[in-house]
Image (tube, coloured by chain):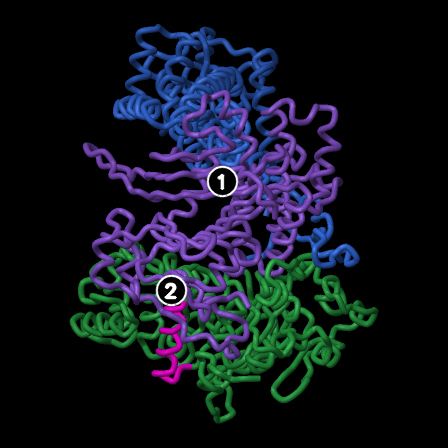
Amino acid sequence: MSESTPVLRVKDLHVDYRLSGGLFSRGRRVRAVAGVDLVVPAGSTVGIVGESGCGKSTLARTIVGLLPPASGQVLLGDVDLATASRAARRRLRPDVQMVFQDPYASLNPWMTVRDLISEPWQIHPGIVPRERWDAEVDRLLELVGLRSSQRGLRPHQFSGGQRQRICIARALAVRPKVIVCDEAVSALDVSIRAQILNLLRDVQAETGVSYVFVSHDLGVVRHIADTVAVMYLGRFVEQGRTDEVFGAPAHPYTQALLSAVPAVDDWRHDRPEEIVLGGEVPSPLAPPSGCRFRTRCFKARDSCAQIEPELTDRAAGHQVACHFAEADARYGIVG
Amino acid sequence: MTYTRPPHGGTPTPTDGAPLISLTDLRLTLGRGAGAVDLVRGVSLDVPQGTTVAVVGESGSGKSLTALSMMGLLPPGVTVGGGDIVFDGTPVARLTEREWQPLRGRQLGMIFQDPLSALNPCIRVGDQIAEMFRLRAGLGRREARDRAVESMVEVGIPDAERRARSYPHEFSGGMRQRVIIAMALSLQPRLLIADEPTTALDVTVQAQIMRLLIARKQARGLTMILISHDLGVVSRSADSVVVMYAGRVVESGPNREVLTRPAHPYTVGLMRSVPDRRRPGAALEAIPGQPPDPRTVPSGCAFHPRCPMARDRCRTEVPALRPVGPARASACHFADEVVGDGANLPETNDASEVSGHV
Amino acid sequence: MTLNPVSSAEAPDRAAAGPGTPTPEANPPVPAPARRRVPPRAWVALGFLALVVLGAAVGPLLLPYSAIETDLPNRLLPPGARLSDGGVALLGTDQLGRDLLAQILAGSRVSVIVGLATVLIGGFAGLVLGLLAGYFGGWIDTLISRLGDAQLAFPSVLLAILIAGVLGPSLTNIIIALAVTRWVIFARVVRASALTVQGLEYVESARVVGAGHLRILVRYILPSCWAPLLVAGTAQIGLAMVAEASLSFLGLGVPVTQASWGATISDGRDYLSSAWWISTLPGVALALVVVAVGLVSDAYRDHTDPRAAL
């Protein structure tokens, strides 16, 4: 992977959700993303893992512009998407695309495959001249492993895996720099999941697109991501090269996550007993003081309630937000 | 091979030989007459007392339907088209709804994938559990209530006394699944059927729930059938594994042997479809194509269009499930080749990693 | 476990399925999983509706009806009775001796026009307002929804009486009065489905691609609103016909010189015990039309909605 200039940078991003209020009260605000920095280099894959409710999907949706940030920046090149003019946003829109989780809900059921893929060219004239649409649709279909004879069909005539291929083709149609995949393979069967993961890799090799790959599936992220960020309650607790983070996790939460992943032949592991975390993720309405993870942490001490740990470098390109961080390869899942 | 950590299911418990439940050539059919489609096409399965049997397969393999048939909960339109289900010596495949009633709860318990839809949203959780005791065990209101709180404590719900007065939507996914487990186990059934019990849960919660299930199972001497698509979960908790494809059993055997030396190309394919820790970043060996539609199952071996080993014989002759070693069976014409072949995972101390769900 | 509705079980091209290459997933999915066939009852219903429309168009030419011309010797004759002049009154005659078949044919004109026009006009207004409310939300939604609520709190017939009373009796005014009372129902139905669809991932995918509001409304939201709108419209065609009857009964409907089913039904009320056919037969006609419209719209919806092709 080239270490060239980043195509996308997220700086100190905060995103709020407004809970619907009552008749006379304004809704309360929930901070779903509470200060996140992220760099997406060209042609590489950044994984974001975390449990449900940690804010990873909110982060993904903010990056593609579906949600407005409360503060902070989403920088595409040097332009901040949040403050850019309407025209600039419209021009930059094609650069960041998204593949959604549910292939049964993310394609307009009334449109044919050809319409689905060529629609972005209608919206952004100039990407592909009209007379080349058919040829370009065929090229994209072939790229994602479908047949050009299938372009007249509608989404319901395809299986889940094939629909996800169509979604990828549609995302690629505008020649994006970044594709955000929000749980893009989670809804697929194991054997189909592998096909789509391979396809994403091949597409990256061919087009040089970057991925932000959001998933709860650690095995999949470990497989596809070059760098990874572990998210807990709206913040990153650990971040770095995938082999570093998954090979020798240093944050207690990452260690617990990785140790909880069951492996096919677990009995041959010399891994320590899995860490079973007590309790559940606290409500983002009232995050714990100090370190957000301390209520479930097996290393927590009194000081954790007072001082919130910052992400600090533990090794080159490996940052951890824990006062008692200690890299431990026993919990790692990379050989 | 080093054996440093037993699977959480423990070593296979000695059995008295008699299966608690057994299926013989079970067929489950959708519709009637000319348009009828077999969704499960002859499944035979023995579950010995006190063991955990995992049924593994992708969507459409018929694994969930097989589980439902053992509870008498087949969806409308699906009927037992042939074969038999024998529970504790009694044939149950053709019982009426009224005859099923006394079996459910007292003899058979079930846990579903989606704990929210399995609970009544308008009734307090404690009352839902208490209802099991009142209606099925004939306890009085007070006593049923106490038993409900007790069983919530047993499944590790903190502050059970107060939480019993909450409604299902006030519980998190993991806590709801605990409630479902409490309900399923409330009448001390002998067989517990868990259909994808942790698929909807985060990985740390999944670990909690699987621990709980196995602890309760061991404390009560329960027999368990675990339906799952996640080989990792299966490997941690099952004694034996049954792999299903297109409505048939393609492989069965003891957990460790099946998952270390699979004897069917489909099992091999499943294991290779998940990211492998020994080759991080390498392309996954995906199984090409997709599972067949039950209306148009391929001739011969149903897996042959996707099988890397398929030969002419596979296209014409349906392979029978036949023994391939002690307590193992495979429905592949070339099972011996698969076991002895490089198709197997090398015997190293490395484990192949299976995707877990956070 | 569910049955996968889209089947494709053919052999994949194994040569292309090596690791790394994008594996074309099995073959072309079966072409359209046999769209549900249009049930025969829908064809029957459609035929009946065609007959009604034809009857409304040309019937009065064949069987002239006069509101003024009375034929007292032949009053209150049952269906099939022989008239004094030798003819046969197929559906009987009313209290003034007018032929009931001619009345029904003539009345179908008013009923069909009022039913269709009300639903078209009210439906269009409701569609536009409902789409805007459901899609944009916020103050637009509040404004439209509150307006609708306020209007619904007022009995719709009363409102229609008020409007028709102010505008005076004429076919156009009846349609206006009824359309004003109906738009809320359509708007609510459309708003509800627009709200549902707008949270779906495929609408978000359009936003991500950069589609504007108009495109999203027309190509993404609107198609999902047709089915519920059609169902509501079907029910409303019947209700509009009935409401027209009420207005006609109150003298606020079409002028007495014009026949309408509603007017005939109310005319016959005094004779229910002695001459049941006067009220019953137009009533039956009304019921048949409503049922037929329902059948046809169901079949149409099943046939066009790609998601219903399971």
Q: Secondary structure at mark 2?
A: loop
The quarter of the picture where residue B161 lies is bottom left
Q: Is residue C214 above or below residue B259?
A: above
Q: Is residue B30 visible?
A: no
Is residue B221 in the magenta section? yes
Q: Is residue B351 visible?
A: yes
Q: Position of residue B56 (x, y in %)?
A: 56, 70
Camera-side mark, 2 or 1 = 2
Q: Position of residue B331 (x, y in %)?
A: 69, 76
Tint of chain B:
green
Residue type at numbered disc 2: Glu
Tint of chain C:
blue
- Tag 2 residue: A326
Q: Which mark is residue B68?
A: none
- Tag 1 residue: C201
The chain that hosts pointer 2 is A
Residue type at numbered disc 1: Glu
Which residue is located at x 74 percent, y 24 percent? Answer: A131
Q: Position of residue A316 (x, y in %)?
A: 47, 54
Q: Is residue B300 above or below residue A97?
A: below
Q: Secondary structure at mark 1?
A: helix
Within 10 Å of disc 2 (Cα), the crowding (few <14, some 14-19, many 20+) is some
Q: Which segment is the magenta one?
A: B207-222
Is residue B86 in the magenta section? no
The chain that hosts pointer 1 is C
Q: Is residue A138 left or right of residue C246?
A: right
Within 10 Å of disc 1 (Cα), the crowding (few <14, some 14-19, many 20+) is many
Which residue is located at x 26 percent, y 50 percent? Answer: A287
Closer-to-camera residue (C111/A214): A214
Q: In the image as oriented, which residue stretches furthest toward the left?
A: B142
The quarter of the picture where residue B231 lies is bottom right
